[in-house]
Image: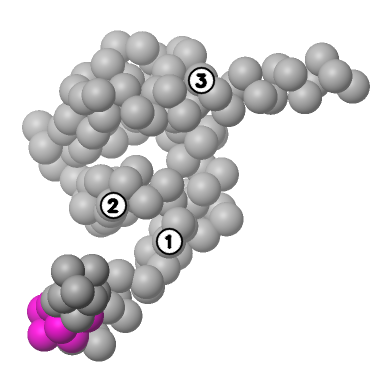
Amino acid sequence: MEKLFVIVLVFLLSKCCFTEDQVETTKKPYDTKFDNIDIDDVLKNERLLKNYVKCLQSEGPCTPDGKMLRDTLPDALLTKCEKCSERQRYASMKVIHYLIEERKDYWSELEKIYDPDGTYRNHYLLDKLASVNRTSAT
């Protein structure tokens, strides 16, 4: 009886608290209008990279794509980028790898804001270990 009550309660809460529009927007992919930005150009250009980092830290002005990134980043990290396009997934991993390996100063500052418990760093390390294992197995 208690299990039935919980099931009914969850069903009723989901019906009363979320409209179809709200449920639909949670499944909607992220906007792809900035997918053509050359990530390598940003990573090689200290001024651009620093501006993006300052934007993500809410310590500097944001370009439209930087603002969109800042607004979607927490959700993308939480959902493991499930609403990302393939290009966004690729760019995200490239940036994370670059920051962790090459720009630890920026990574540590962003990690305090977006990954204080180290979850995404651990995902990165597991991915890197799996990649090394695949390479050495061939």
Q: Is residue 128 visible?
A: yes
Is 21 placed left or right of 80 in the picture?
A: left
Q: Residue at coordinates 27% horizontally, 16% vertically from top-left? A: 108
Front residue of this view, candidates 49 and 30: 30
Q: Secondary structure at mark 3?
A: helix
Q: Specify the amino acid type for callout 2.
A: Asp
Asked if labels 1 and 2 touch by Cβ distance under 8 angstroms, the answer is yes
Q: Is residue 43 visible?
A: no
Q: Which residues are magenta?
A: 10-18
| Horizontal and vertical percent position of residue 127 | 58, 28
Is 29 placed left or right of 110 in the picture?
A: right
Is 10 placed left or right of 127 in the picture?
A: left
> How many C-alpha atoms fall within 10 Å of the one at disc 2: few (<14), some, or many (≥20)?
some
Residue 5 magenta-highlighted: no
Question: Disc 2 marks which residue?
Answer: 75
Q: Specify the amino acid type for callout 3.
A: Leu
Q: Of the numbered discs in the image, which one, if any, rests on residue 44?
A: none
Front residue of this view, candidates 102 and 100: 100
Q: Of the numbered discs in the image, which one, if any, rests on residue 125?
A: 3
Q: Residue at coordinates 69% horizontally, 24% vertically from top-left? A: 131
Q: CA distance from mark 1 to mark 3?
A: 22 Å
Q: CA distance from mark 2 to mark 3?
A: 21 Å
Q: Of the numbered discs in the image, which one, if any, rests on residue 83?
A: 1
Q: Is residue 51 above or below residue 128?
A: below
Q: Secondary structure at mark 1?
A: loop
Asked if labels 3 and 1 touch by Cβ distance under 8 angstroms, the answer is no
Q: CA distance from mark 2 to mark 1?
A: 9 Å
Front residue of this view, candidates 35 and 48: 35
